[in-house]
Image (spheres, helix red, strand yellow):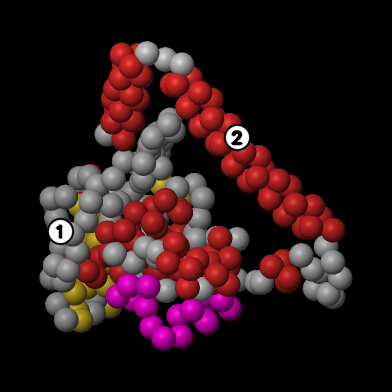
């Protein structure tokens, strides 16, 4: 039997499960047990002596030592919604249990102080940055949308994706979870740019105009900064001996490898 647990505080008694002050009858469906809508608690007993949640979790979902149980909605996002994350986790778990998934353990720390897929404090060790975490799950499932292809084939959809937040519907556009109406559903999921810059009565919101203008200016400045840095690097390399160039290149490769690993 497989257990799918979602934000629960659970105690067991024969055919019933107690969640806080509510009792849920145990229902077995296709040899799987599904429990949902309960309160968060870090450790579980499940009327057994093993403490499943004390062992490291694969992708913050499935314990390494007990692959027949999955914790959905326990990854705590610093940015993003638990509901969105839980939906992505449920897809990932279903594929994992069907042996239709080959996952990778990624480290996205790079120049950050912490890996956005593995953050912890003195209370919680399942903190993630939601957008990075959902992208990580999507890459495992092969449903990460190809933005270059979308830019070429559907620039309107590409523009919608770029100025909208990460949402599970994004990962229904391409891959095994896509369907014919997925594009239209995604386009209707978020307000249009015109709706964003207007009040409910239809008048222009000058504050939002200023926000998007400043947002665009920052991106333009960032792109210019990247080009300036590249120019100076190339200029410096042209005036540097071959041995120093090799030394700089090897140092860069080693530092990149250390940050990634």
Quadrant of image for the N terminus? bottom left
Res. 9 visible in picture: no
State the CA–CA distance, disc 1 to disc 2. 47 Å
**What number is the disc on residue 67?**
1
Query: Where does the magenta region start and end?
Result: 174-188
Res. 217 visible in picture: yes
- Helix, strand or loop under label 1: loop
- Helix, strand or loop under label 2: helix
Q: What residue sits right under mark 2 in the picture?
A: 225
Q: Is 177 part of what is drawn in magenta?
A: yes
Dot 2 alpha-carbon crowd within 10 angstroms: few under 14, some 14 to 19, many 20 or more: few
Farthest bottom residue in view = 180
Is residue 164 toward the left or the right of residue 210 in the image? left
The relative height of residue 85 versus residue 183 in the rendered view (above or below) is above
In front of the other: 96 or 156: 156
The image shows residue 197 at horizontal and vertical percentages of 76, 65
The image shows residue 55 at horizontal and vertical percentages of 20, 45
Q: Is 190 part of what is drawn in magenta?
A: no
The relative height of residue 202 versus residue 125 in the rendered view (above or below) is below
The image shows residue 260 at horizontal and vertical percentages of 31, 35
Is residue 241 toward the left or the right of residue 141 in the image? right
In front of the other: 63 or 5: 63
Closer mark to the observer between disc 1 and disc 2 = 2
The relative height of residue 168 versus residue 47 in the rendered view (above or below) is below
**What number is the disc on residue 27?**
none
């Amino acid at each position: 039997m497989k257990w799918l647990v979602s934000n629960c505080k659970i105690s067991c008694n024969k055919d019933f499960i107690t969640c806080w002050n509510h009792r849920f009858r145990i229902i077995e469906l296709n040899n799987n047990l599904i429990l949902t809508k309960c309160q968060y608690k870090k450790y579980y007993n499940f009327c057994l002596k093993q403490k499943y949640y004390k062992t490291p979790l694969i992708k913050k979902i499935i314990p390494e030592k007990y692959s027949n149980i999955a914790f959905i909605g326990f990854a705590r996002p610093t940015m993003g919604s638990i509901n969105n994350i839980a939906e992505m986790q449920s897809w990932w778990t279903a594929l994992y249990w069907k042996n239709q998934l080959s996952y990778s353990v990624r480290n996205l720390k790079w120049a950050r102080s912490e890996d956005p897929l593995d953050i912890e404090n003195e209370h919680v060790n399942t903190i993630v940055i939601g957008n990075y975490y959902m992208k990580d799950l999507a890459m495992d499932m092969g449903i990460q949308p190809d933005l270059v292809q979308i830019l070429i084939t559907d620039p309107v959809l590409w523009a919608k994706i770029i100025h909208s937040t990460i949402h599970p519907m994004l990962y229904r556009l391409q891959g095994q979870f896509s369907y014919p109406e997925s594009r239209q559903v995604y386009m209707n999921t978020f307000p249009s740019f015109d709706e964003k810059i207007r009040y409910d009565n239809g008048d222009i919101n000058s504050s939002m105009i200023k926000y998007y203008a400043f947002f665009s200016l920052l991106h333009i400045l960032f792109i210019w900064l990247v080009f300036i840095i590249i120019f100076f690097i190339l200029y410096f390399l042209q005036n540097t001996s071959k041995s120093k160039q090799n030394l700089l290149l090897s140092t860069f490769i080693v530092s990149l490898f250390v940050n990634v690993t």
